Amino acid sequence: MKQMRNIGIFAHVDAGKTTLSEQLLLHAGAIRTQGSVDSGTAHTDTLPVERRRGISVKATCVSFSWKNVQINLIDTPGHVDFSAEVERSLWALDAAVLVVCAVEGVQPQTEVLFSAMKEQGLPVLFFINKTDREGADTVRVAAQIRRLLSQKASLLDDSEALAEIISDADDDFMERFLEGESFSEEELREKTAALSQKGQAYPILSGSALKNQGVEPLLDGIVNFLPEPRVLPAFCGVVFAAQQDRIHGRGVWVRLFGGALESRETVQLPGGIDPITADVRTVQQKITQIHGIDGGNVSRLSAGEIGIVYGLGNVPIGHVLGDEQALGRQIEPGKLRTPLIEVQAIPQKAEEMQALRAACEVLSGEDPLLQVQYVKALNELHLRVMGTIQLEILEELLKTRFGLSAVFTKPAIIYKETIAQKAEGFVAYTMPKPCWAILKFEIEPGPRGSGVTFTSKVPVKDIMARYQHQVEQAIPLALAQGRLGWQVTDVKITLVDGNHHLIHTHPLDFIIATPMGIQDGLQRGGSTLLEPILDVRFLLPPECAGRVMSDVVAMRGEVLESFSDGDRVILNALVPVQTSLDYSITLASATGGRGAMSVKLHGYRECPLELGATAKRRNVDPLDTSKYILAARSALEGGIFDL
């Protein structure tokens, strides 16, 4: 098999990542002229909106060769609103290049990225970029990388640091090191390369992509310090992105870790839940075509390779093909960032609502963290998104790609709720016949962050096993909106009593009855509003630290710690989303553009109702029994499954 590297280039915004990608392509002979971010000609920025705005929105995969090694490179967005693209790229890679600016140094987003790479077990090569700029200090930034990210990182010309890193992993080498033996540069690099390929050392290179400095040493570093794909014995791969082709339809980007996929081959995929048995259905989909990274047709995708596969229908992003256990990786959408705000999308022309809905659903299929909800009864289209930049990009994509104009309402925070105290919920769904489903639940608060747990204490002689499966299947439906209108979480639900009827029970009765019983319990137990809390890391000029601390308190937040790191202060805090939505603008103004912040979801905590908000119900209330049963039986427009 041809030698190969599957790598990604990552960075905080404005670290020069896309310019570096252009230089790598140019030096490898993959392009003849270097593109420019500012002029909108970057080869890895393929969307019109990316070229116009000079920012990367979607991850882009390109391939080139260097010294007889094929390098498949994924260039990722730097802006935090597009963290989902970054996260999905990590699923497909064997290693990463993390770009750090020689002036600003390690930014909060750099720490978030490195932490995610370590979770995935990816070897990392650092590249300190923009060494040509005034104020650049490679040694200072390398020291920051060691201090804030990993003690196993070192500049390649720092022989002593390399020797220390090798000694930690090699007892024989340590003995020689302690005896004062000197080592050749060749031996240090060989041993560093062996450790780096296993993620036990992190070499640091430097240069200026803009000035064409340090690019070829980086290419050599990718070949020498980063590993080849590890081929797994079992068939497995991951779907990490999707795109729409005018001719071939929906295609999905697949990284194959073991086995092979061939054109015209039939693949078994999940096909939803059987409403009667609650079992996962499977469907057979035939691969119609496979494209390589360069867009050309290929007949086969082999282990270690990345390609675009057509014919797999609506297979979701994040789906693992084949043996999920063999993959040995965490494929969990929303780990880096999850949507925390919601807007309503309103078409410019009322008659275009269904076209707008269809367009948003296509875009959601390409980005699962763009969540689309159409409320038929209200004729409303709701979108859950990452941030305001994503909304601006979405507005442009709707215009340029679908020819649709839409406006968005003011962003609203996505709250959650939980039950306030332990309570029982009961339902006897026995009228109007034919129907029979009697259920009694115990619902109690769970620890914060525990989600939803369900258990049953009812013997199968009282409620048949398949009906109990239906109850469990209907729990997400029952908790989609609580008494305050938000998704219910952090609850423990136990089915403690109930029965079916051999003659009168209809196959779907327990799915219909479950929300009525659950909502009865939620009403009896009362509701507690939960608001999303952000874990925020600030990098600040020392003179601005006091002002930001005061702002955190004013935002109902709390400062966890602060410490000095050379010429700046690092401040960690917890802050509610509701009070900090636009704080990045305030921070830039207060610090003269010298402050930075990164955010990730910390979790949810209790919030007084007067400081939060309720949400209007989007379907028929299960406690409005007559209407709900009619809706459930499809007698009313909307229906109970229209969430």
Image (cartoon, rainbow, N blue to C red):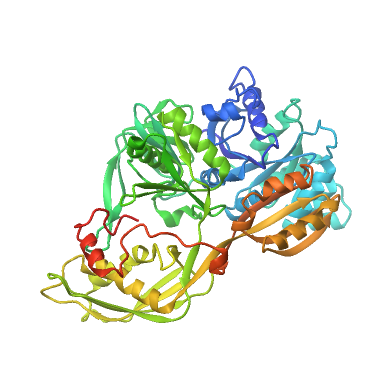
Q: Which residue is drawn at 46% across and 67% down?
A: 489
Q: Is residue 115 above or below residue 307?
A: below
Residue situated in front as seen by the camera: 611 or 385 = 611
Residue 419 image position (x, y, % from top left)? 45, 74
Classify the position of the C terminus by image quarter: bottom left
Outermost residue toward the left? 503
Q: Which residue is drawn at 10% across and 74% down?
A: 503
- Res 525 quadrant in image: bottom left
Q: In this view, does 143 lie above or below 277?
A: above
Q: Is residue 347 visible?
A: yes
Q: Is residue 325 above or below residue 64?
A: below
Residue 246 image position (x, y, % from top left)? 37, 27
Residue 609 image position (x, y, % from top left)? 53, 68
Q: Is residue 94 visible?
A: no
Q: Which residue is drawn at 76% across and 51% down?
A: 539
| Horizontal side of residue 167 vs 318, given as left or right | right
